[in-house]
Image: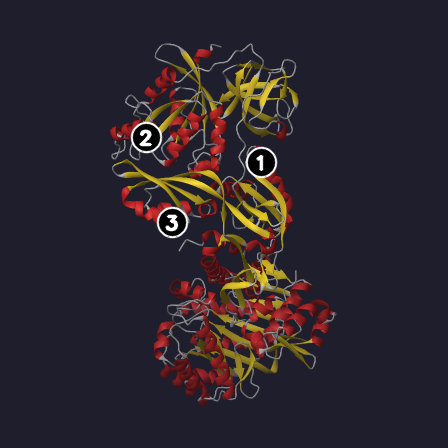
């Protein structure tokens, strides 16, 4: 059976954070119910389209999936179990925000097999949480974390952010201390990205350009400061026993996020729900991004209408078949995000050609410059290579 | 055709005094054009001219005017460029005329280019009639301007037409003045043919269209003609005159007329501007005095941004050269920029115009190197070379001394700014010649200045220091010995030939420092530190550093981000392709032009 990952998108949140450019919005419960019904239809539809798959991980992301009432979450997971063959050891993650969980909800999660939670904290400083437009304060997070542990979850991630406006090493240290003290199994530490279409973009776009150019900034940390914050995070987490296994991801005792590692290893995955992306049979595809259109497709399927389009799924808005060149490029720029990099043998197994035949001169040059290293059949970026990974990874695009 | 009913004239003026508007109005008032045909400025054909509001190429038009005396007159109006860079073109146009209308702005009065143009017209023995324009302006002061014209130029101006070309007020006075005050052409239609070529144009169907002024004899269809300088012979296929925006064929062009001829001429070089056309079988004894060919004053390297477009750039330059004899070019190579051309221009405006035309009309993406004047390098072996490309400067041990071209500049400025302008000239190594008050509040300042001090941004500096109240004109005044050095730029320890330039040794340090600062901002950070140095010979005189990029990470890359992430990496890679690789440093094309803008801050 083909191992496969499922990503399930819940595009709802209590309130949009000021930096967020994800496909999500505030919708009432009626819309949430209509959407989840549509989602279940797609799960069944995709299962029929991809027989013989074994689901190894499920990741319910958003938005804030935990905001859904527990019966809706139950319906989703149950539908997956009824439609797909699910690995008994599957990792099933749900994203949540402080304040969206209750003891009852968590008990339902446990009973339906959800075994990993990812909590968006971002900062332990209430002034920073306010700047970010988050719905919670630090105390609320502590309360949620306590509920999660009491419900018996032993695989928990906490998201934090660096490079925030006016962030100092002292403030970051407070956040890192507040988080590591609780000993979550996993920490994701992201640098703030100023994305187009967000209120942050309007507010900080000039600063972001200045930061990029290495100039003095107004509110965002300068490039140099942001580098210091990023390095401080690495060192701090390492000192607390968190091993960095990808650019922004750290785990204790090997509790990495299997689902996410799948993306970097190019494991096939099906994206279910609004705007989700899939990789299957070397085709990358994206679902429609209009929530009404999405629901209508499912409702048409339910009423037995013909929904065929020229694309391989009626939910797709676009799809692109990857050439061998595309696949090799992806293999490199995704695989090298992992701290342990890529295995020469895996490249050969995937493409039937030695990695050096394609990338030999680039690898040699990067190793010479100290951005890359090799050990035991693996190629990986060095610390300074990761620091400038956009520059380094772009070299793996072929002409 | 009655020669006494012909008037060949041009309009001269300082820039923006309303020359082209008056030309439009004359054409409109004489009725050769319907209002519908009347575009904003008929004579300014090129897009570029219309956008910049200046006239680059000479244009000509024939119009019919029924005068108050009841007679019909033929006017051949030849438009001329106003800018000093195009004196050469002005000269060509003037040679085809018998008279000139001098337009003076009723508010601004006489400006530097007014004088320059009048002197040119007088040099060509033209009769000049002054016209005072823009009298509808609230600030118009025609009485003062009349006095200025009489005092400074020495032209009788009491009866000068006072007009508004914009509104059409009193244009009739101008037309009558043309009839009564400008001379009719002379010349015997039966004499041996002498026709002066003052411009040409390439038409894909008719071949070269030669613009000429018939001085003696008659040019007819079917005539066998010879170009007296090149010796090329042709059979005339068509002769005609210039309608507004079109060619109107006729049977013959007798002495006194301005018109065109075609003769299936494929090669523009056969019909040099300034040459004399005569009959093959009954040639004139001698050619008309041509006008002196001007040499380019400013040189720069033009390189295609995409190396594969080199042949396209050559074709485009060849086509532009067809009707712009002042443009010169020859192939050169640069380590940093690859294959390109060293091009010679009349001045910086000419350079900019050519550059813009190449980019707009020929769709070329160009990299331009710093403009340079022509230096004379006297070597120890007694020979002299004219240096147009700084990177060709011989080894200092072979150089005895160097000379640089000088100009005599005339600057007209209101008295409040005299000090500021004199400071500017002083900073630019100017040598004071004289200053005279031409009226109570305005003075004419004369300075000798090195050409290389004015080719970059002198005009802008002049305008900003005088709040727009200074006008400027210059003429070449030969060469002067000078203490010059070659300033090299080293990026990551490698000399970048395209960035080398010649500079006065006294300002070399300042230039080098500014150049390094500018380049520091232009060159993006790399994965390693990049020293930028300015050096004279082996001596480094300024240094800046582009700090290494320490962090460039995309924090998130999950299932939904992968396509986007790839696009980001592609963009990064694409951006590098558009840069020039020097050693292992990628230099954006804009960096090569940054030297032009050293004094902006």
**Figure quadrant of residue B263:** top right
What crowding class fits label 1: few (fewer than 14 Cα within 10 Å), some (14-19), or many (20 or more)? some
Pick whichever, B43 or B573, lies toward us: B43
Left of B219 or right of it: where is B103?
Answer: left
- Check chain identity for marks 2 and 3: say if they share one: yes
Residue A132 percent across, percent down from the top left: 38, 72
Label 2 marks a residue whose chain is B
Identify the image quadrant of the N terminus of chain A: bottom right
Look at 50% across and 28% down and name the residue there.
Answer: B92
Question: Which badge, 2 or 1, comes first in the chain's sequence?
Answer: 2
What crowding class fits label 2: few (fewer than 14 Cα within 10 Å), some (14-19), or many (20 or more)? few
What crowding class fits label 3: few (fewer than 14 Cα within 10 Å), some (14-19), or many (20 or more)? some
| Vertical side of B484 occupied by B241: above or below | above
**Figure quadrant of residue B240:** top right
Question: What is the C-alpha distance between the residues marked 2 and 3?
Answer: 26 Å
Question: Which badge, 2 or 3, comes first in the chain's sequence?
Answer: 2
Label 3 marks a residue whose chain is B
Q: Is disc 2 in contact with disc 3, using a CB cutoff of under 8 Å?
A: no
Pick whichever, A257 or A62, lies toward us: A257
- Residue for badge 1: B321
Residue A308 percent across, percent down from the top left: 60, 58
SS under mark 2: helix
- Check chain identity for marks 2 and 1: say if they share one: yes
Pick whichever, A113 or A353, lies toward us: A353
Q: Is residue B251 visible?
A: no
Identify the image quadrant of the C terminus of chain A: bottom right
- Residue for badge 2: B152
- Check chain identity for marks 3 and 1: say if they share one: yes
- Residue for badge 3: B426
Question: What is the C-alpha distance between the residues marked 3 and 1?
Answer: 37 Å
Left of A109 or right of it: where is B498?
Answer: right
SS under mark 1: helix
């Amino acid at each position: 059976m083909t191992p496969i990952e499922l990503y399930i998108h819940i595009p709802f949140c209590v309130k949009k954070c000021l930096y967020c450019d994800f496909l999500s919005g505030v919708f009432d419960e009626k819309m949430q119910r209509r959407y989840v019904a549509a989602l279940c239809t797609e799960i069944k539809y995709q299962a029929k389209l991809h027989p013989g798959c074994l689901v190894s991980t499920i990741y319910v992301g958003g938005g804030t999936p935990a905001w859904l009432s527990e019966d809706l979450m139950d319906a989703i997971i149950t539908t997956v179990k009824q439609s797909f063959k699910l690995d008994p050891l599957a990792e099933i993650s749900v994203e949540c925000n402080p304040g969206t969980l209750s003891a009852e909800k968590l008990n339902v999660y446990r009973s339906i097999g959800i075994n990993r939670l990812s909590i968006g904290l971002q900062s332990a400083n209430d002034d920073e949480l306010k700047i970010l437009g988050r719905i919670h304060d630090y105390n609320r997070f502590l309360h949620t974390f306590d509920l999660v542990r009491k419900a018996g979850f032993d695989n928990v991630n906490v998201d934090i952010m660096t490079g925030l406006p006016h962030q100092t090493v002292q403030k970051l240290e407070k956040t890192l201390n507040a988080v590591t003290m609780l000993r979550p199994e996993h920490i994701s530490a992201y640098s703030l990205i100023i994305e187009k279409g967000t209120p942050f973009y309007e507010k900080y776009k000039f600063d972001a350009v200045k930061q990029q150019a290495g100039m003095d900034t107004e509110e965002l940390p300068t490039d140099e400061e942001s580098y210091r914050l990023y390095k401080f995070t690495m060192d701090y987490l390492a000192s607390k026993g968190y091993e960095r296994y990808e650019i922004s991801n750290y785990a204790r005792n090997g509790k990495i996020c299997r689902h996410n590692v799948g993306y970097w290893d190019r494991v096939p995955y099906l994206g279910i729900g609004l705007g989700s992306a899939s990789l299957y049979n070397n085709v990358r595809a994206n679902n429609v991004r209009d929530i009404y259109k999405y629901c209508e497709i499912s409702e048409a399927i339910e009423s037995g209408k013909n929904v065929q389009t020229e694309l391989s799924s009626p939910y797709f808005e676009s799809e692109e078949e990857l050439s061998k060149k595309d696949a090799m490029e992806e293999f490199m720029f995704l695989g090298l995000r992992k701290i342990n990099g890529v295995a020469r043998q895996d490249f050969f197994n995937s493409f039937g050609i030695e990695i050096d035949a394609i990338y030999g001169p680039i690898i040699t040059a990067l190793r010479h410059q100290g951005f890359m290293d090799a050990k035991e059949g693996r190629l990986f970026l060095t610390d300074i290579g990761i620091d400038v990974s956009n520059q380094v990874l772009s070299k793996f695009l072929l002409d | 055709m009655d020669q006494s009913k012909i008037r060949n004239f041009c309009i001269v003026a300082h820039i923006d005094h309303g020359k082209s508007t008056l030309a439009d109005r004359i054409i409109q008032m004489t009725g050769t054009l319907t209002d519908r045909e009347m575009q904003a400025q008929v004579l300014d054909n090129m897009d570029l001219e219309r956008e910049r509001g200046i006239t680059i190429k000479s244009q000509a038009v024939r119009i019919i005017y029924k005068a108050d005396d009841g007679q019909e007159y033929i006017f051949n109006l030849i438009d001329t460029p106003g800018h000093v860079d195009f004196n050469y073109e002005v000269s060509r146009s003037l040679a085809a005329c018998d008279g000139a209308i001098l337009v003076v702005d009723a508010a601004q009065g006489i400006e530097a280019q007014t004088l320059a143009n009048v002197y040119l017209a007088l040099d060509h023995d033209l009769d000049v009639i002054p016209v005072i324009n823009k009298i509808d302006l609230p600030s118009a002061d025609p009485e003062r301007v009349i006095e200025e014209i009489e005092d400074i130029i020495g032209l009788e101006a009491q009866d000068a037409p006072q007009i508004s070309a914009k509104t059409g007020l009193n244009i009739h006075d101008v037309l009558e003045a043309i009839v009564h005050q400008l001379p009719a052409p002379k010349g015997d239609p039966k004499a041996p043919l002498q026709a002066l070529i003052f411009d040409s144009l390439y038409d894909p169907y008719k071949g070269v269209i030669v613009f000429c002024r018939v001085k003696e004899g008659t040019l007819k269809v079917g005539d066998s003609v010879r170009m007296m300088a090149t010796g090329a012979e042709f059979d005339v296929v068509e002769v005609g005159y210039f309608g507004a925006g079109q060619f109107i064929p006729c049977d013959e062009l007798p002495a006194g007329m301005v018109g065109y001829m075609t003769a299936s001429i494929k090669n523009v070089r056969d019909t040099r501007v300034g040459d004399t056309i005569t009959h093959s079988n009954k040639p004139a004894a001698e050619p008309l005095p041509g006008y002196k060919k001007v040499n380019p004053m400013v040189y720069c390297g033009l390189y295609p941004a995409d190396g594969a477009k080199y042949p396209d750039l050559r074709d485009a330059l060849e086509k532009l050269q067809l009707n712009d004899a002042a443009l010169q070019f020859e192939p050169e190579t640069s380590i940093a920029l690859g294959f390109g051309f060293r091009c010679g221009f009349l001045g910086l405006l000419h350079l900019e115009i050519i550059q813009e035309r190449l980019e707009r009309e020929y769709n070329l993406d160009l990299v331009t190197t710093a403009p340079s004047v022509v230096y004379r390098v006297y070597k120890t072996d007694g020979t002299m070379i004219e240096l147009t490309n700084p990177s060709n400067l011989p080894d200092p041990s072979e150089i005895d001394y160097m000379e640089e071209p000088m100009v005599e500049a005339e600057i007209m400025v209101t008295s409040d700014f005299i000090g500021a302008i004199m400071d500017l000239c002083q900073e630019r190594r100017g040598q004071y010649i004289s200053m005279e008050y031409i009226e109570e509040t305005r003075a004419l300042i004369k300075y000798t200045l090195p050409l290389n001090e004015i080719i970059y941004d002198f005009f802008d500096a002049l305008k900003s220091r005088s709040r727009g109240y200074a006008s400027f004109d210059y003429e070449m005044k030969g060469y002067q010995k000078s203490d010059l050095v070659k300033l090299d730029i080293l990026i990551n320890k490698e000399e970048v030939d395209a960035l080398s330039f010649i500079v006065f040794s006294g300002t070399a340090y300042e230039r080098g420092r500014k150049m390094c600062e500018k380049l520091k901002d232009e060159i993006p950070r790399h994965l390693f530190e990049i020293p930028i140095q300015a050096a004279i010979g082996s001596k480094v005189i300024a240094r800046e550093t582009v700090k290494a990029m320490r962090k460039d990470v995309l924090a998130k890359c999950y299932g939904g981000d992968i396509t986007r992430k790839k696009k980001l990496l592609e963009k990064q890679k694409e951006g590098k392709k558009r840069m020039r690789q020097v050693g292992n440093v990628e230099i954006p094309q804009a960096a090569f032009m940054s030297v032009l803008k050293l004094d902006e801050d």
